[in-house]
Image: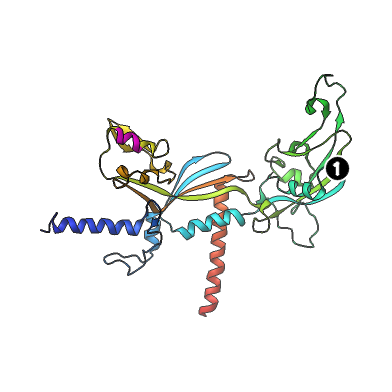
Amino acid sequence: KKKGGSQEEAVVSTQSTGEEIRNKIHLDLHTVRNTEDTKYPGTYSGYDDSWNFSKFKKDFKFEIVSRSAREVEFDMIGIDTPFANAFRRILLAEVPTMAVEEVFINNNTSVMQDEVLAHRLGLLPINVDPRLFEMKKKGDKVTERNTLRFRLKVRCKRNKKAPSDTTNPDELYLNSKVYTRTIEWEPIGDQKNWIPGGVRFTEDDILVNVLRPGQELDMVLDAVKGIGSDHAKFSPVATASYRLMPEIQLLQPFRGHLAEKLKECFSPGVIEIVDGEAVVKCARLDTGSREVLRHSELADKVKLLKVRDHFIFTIESTGALDPLDLMREAIRILKEKCKVYRKELDVLTT
């Protein structure tokens, strides 16, 4: 036996530390350790870290945590950071949507300049499935398969029935605020029959412009299919992000005032006090503030980790497609990229 413990205890301790280095990221007060992935063949004695498709299929998990019409949160477990980041980048920049590309202005007497108004119109998200349309290339003519057309025609007037003592512009004037519901879809060709549910903007109450009596807007808007890497207006997501699953280890029991202090160091719901003792209730709610490490009486009794291959993914759609459909499209696009890459490799090896 060695002083302070047996050889077996020392071996177990070493293995535990090795597992953390392989699979966890360690958060210190001012630094983050073990950020690099070291699970490569030959790095660790006694481990087979060669990539195996059967093992990947067995270990990989996709679990939906919450879902709504516009937002989804899910866990991707068993993949490396480059894959998670590839999905994020594809969602932001390569999943196509429809957006206003050309604005034909017949009349604009508002205080908003033509260029600013056209830019504003381009950023309005359109609620239509972009998979129904084709990309419009330079020089292509407008067809029902590559273009959506809208008409914006509105004029502000004085409200003759407004109360004499009011100063509210909404009561004094008619059409003083131009919203997306004012913009009308004008079907091209047979679009009305093959676009299910018609076409509209994702929200009816997005403010486009403000008018005063005598001011008028008269313009035609053409929307085309595009991707976010060409212009941000084509990005299908308001946000697509991921973070690693937190892990909090309490190295000793916490009771009394120390338990209360520990609870206050984390976001609500992370630490709870059960039968007078602090326990980790839901580590995924932790924001990684590391506040607990600022207190000397707590710092060496708590270990903050991140699970290296457990990603908490959040997708918030602008409304054109369901967020899970966006993820399916991102997977499809990544598969197409892989096919191209494999063809290039085949050319090099033949």
Write the residue at 21% across / 56% down. 12
Q: Main secondary structure of the magenta part?
A: helix
Q: For the magenta stretch, what is the residue range?
A: 257-262
Instruction: Check the picture and name the quadrant holding the N terminus.
Output: bottom left
Res. 201 image quadrant: top right
Residue pushed farthest left? 1
Res. 268 image quadrant: top left
Does the rendering let one see residue 127?
Answer: no
Write the residue at 29% across / 64% down. 47
Q: Is residue 48 above or below residue 235?
A: below
Judging by the rendered image, the residue that carries numbered circle 1 is 218
Q: Secondary structure at mark 1?
A: strand
Residue 186: percent from left, percent from top: 80, 43
Residue 18: percent from left, percent from top: 29, 59
Q: Is residue 23 left or right of residue 155?
A: left
Q: Is residue 34 above or below residue 152?
A: below
Tell me the amino acid under the disc marked 1.
Answer: Asp
Dot 1, how many residues are within 10 Å of its Cα: few (below 14), some (14-19), or many (20+)?
A: some
Q: Is residue 280 left or right of residue 217?
A: left
Q: Is residue 166 left or right of residue 324?
A: right
Residue 264: percent from left, percent from top: 38, 36
Q: Is residue 32 magenta?
A: no
Front one among 101 and 185: 101
Write the residue at 54% across / 60% down. 334
Q: Is residue 22 above or below residue 72?
A: below
Does the rendering let one see residue 321?
Answer: yes
Front one among 40 and 169: 169
Front one among 252 and 50: 252
Residue pushed farthest bottom? 350
